[in-house]
Image (cartoon, rainbow, N blue to C red):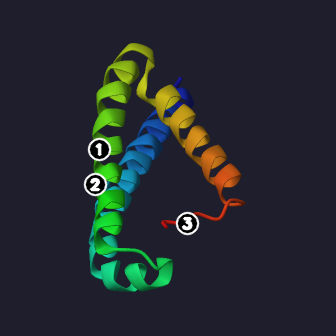
Amino acid sequence: MLSKSLSAKAAELWLLALVALMFIAMCAEADMYVPAFPEMVQYFSTTEDKIQLILSLNFVGLCIASLICGPLSDAFGRRRILLYSVTCLLWTKFILKNYKVTFR
């Protein structure tokens, strides 16, 4: 009985650490993105408006995902929704890494 409660507590702490890490990464993304605007404009040969649009769409996607995943995690459990979301993210990144993105 004691080992079961310890493993449940460890799983709960692991999930809390994972959520905290994802939140930190989300905040750090914008902090790293904005100072790199001029280099990104040159690297992708595009305008600053298009780079800003990507950041804006990123925030819009985050807000929409929060509105969808919040109620789903309340209904089905946070762990299941989090694992499904991370799996979808990894598959999407795996599929899209083979495509060259252009902003022209």
Q: Is residue 37 above or below residue 25?
A: below
Asked which secondary structure carries label 1, the reply is helix
Looking at the image, the residue that sits furthest to the front is: 104
Q: Is residue 35 visible?
A: yes
Q: Nearer the viewer, mark 3 or mark 1?
A: 3
- The residue lying toward the viewer, choosing from 24 and 17, is 24
Which residue is the site of mark 2?
A: 56
- Label 2 close to label 1 by CB (< 8 Å): yes
Q: Position of residue 91 (x, y in %)?
A: 66, 45
Q: Is residue 32 above or below residue 50?
A: below
- Amino acid carrying label 1: it is Val
Question: On the rendered structure, is 38 left or right of 40?
Answer: left
- The residue lying toward the viewer, choosing from 93 and 11, is 93
Tag 3: Cα neighbours inside 10 Å, few (<14), some, or many (≥20)? Answer: few
State the separation of the CA atoms marked 2 and 1. Answer: 6 Å
- The residue positioned 68% from the left and 59% from the top of the image is 99
- Amino acid carrying label 3: it is Thr
State the separation of the CA atoms marked 3 and 1. Answer: 21 Å
Residue 9, image quadrant: top left
- Label 2 close to label 3 by CB (< 8 Å): no
- Amino acid carrying label 2: it is Ser
Q: Position of residue 21 (x, y in %)?
A: 39, 56
Q: What number of labels is visible? A: 3
- The residue positioned 59% from the left and 39% from the top of the image is 88
Q: Position of residue 12 (x, y in %)?
A: 43, 37
Mark 2 or 3, nearer chain start: 2
Asked which secondary structure carries label 3, the reply is loop
Which residue is the site of mark 1?
A: 60
Q: Nearer the viewer, mark 2 or mark 3?
A: 3
Q: Is residue 5 visible?
A: no
Which residue is the site of mark 3?
A: 102
- The residue positioned 36% from the left and 59% from the top of the image is 54
